[in-house]
Amino acid sequence: MAHATTSRASTFTIGQRFRAGFAMVSERAAQNRVYRSTIAELSNLNDRELADLGLHRSMIKAVARTAAYGE
């Protein structure tokens, strides 16, 4: 039985991997801030103001998720 093994040396330095990881964490934190602030702002509106925007109170989290994460 033959086995083939391939080894690939990483082309990224430890500094580059650290920066990429930090950038990913920073981006996620920024998205989380958008999510929380969107929920806070929409929650402060009354039902009529939400209706004027075409929203219902039950839609706030979904709208915030779309605004923050694009889902």
Image: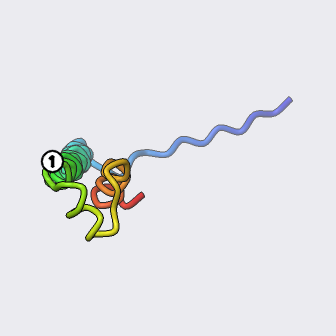
Looking at this view, name the residue that lies furthest to the top.
1
Q: Position of residue 2 (x, y in %)?
A: 81, 33
Looking at this view, name the residue that lies furthest to the front.
48
Q: Nearer the viewer, residue 12 or 45?
A: 45
Asked which secondary structure carries label 1, the reply is helix
Judge whether residue 6 can be spotted in this image: yes
Colour setup of the view = rainbow
What residue do we see at 54% from left, 41% from top?
7
Q: Position of residue 16 (x, y in %)?
A: 23, 50
Quarter of the figure with the N terminus: top right
What residue do we see at 34% from left, 56% from top?
56
Q: Is residue 39 left or right of residue 60?
A: left
Q: Is 66 situated above or below 10? A: below
Residue under numbered circle 1: 40
Q: Is residue 10 left or right of residue 7?
A: left
Kind of residue at badge 1:
Ala
Q: Position of residue 38 (x, y in %)?
A: 19, 54
Total labels drawn:
1
Q: Position of residue 48 (x, y in %)?
A: 23, 62
Judge whether residue 19 can be spotted in this image: no
Q: Nearer the viewer, residue 18 or 33?
A: 33
Q: Is 71 situated above or below 17? A: below
What residue do we see at 37% from left, 61% from top?
70
What residue do we see at 42% from left, 57% from top?
71
Q: Residues within 10 Å of mark 1 (few under 14, many from 20)?
A: few
Task: Name which quarter of the figure residue 9 lies in.
Answer: top left
Q: Nearer the viewer, residue 47 or 41?
A: 47
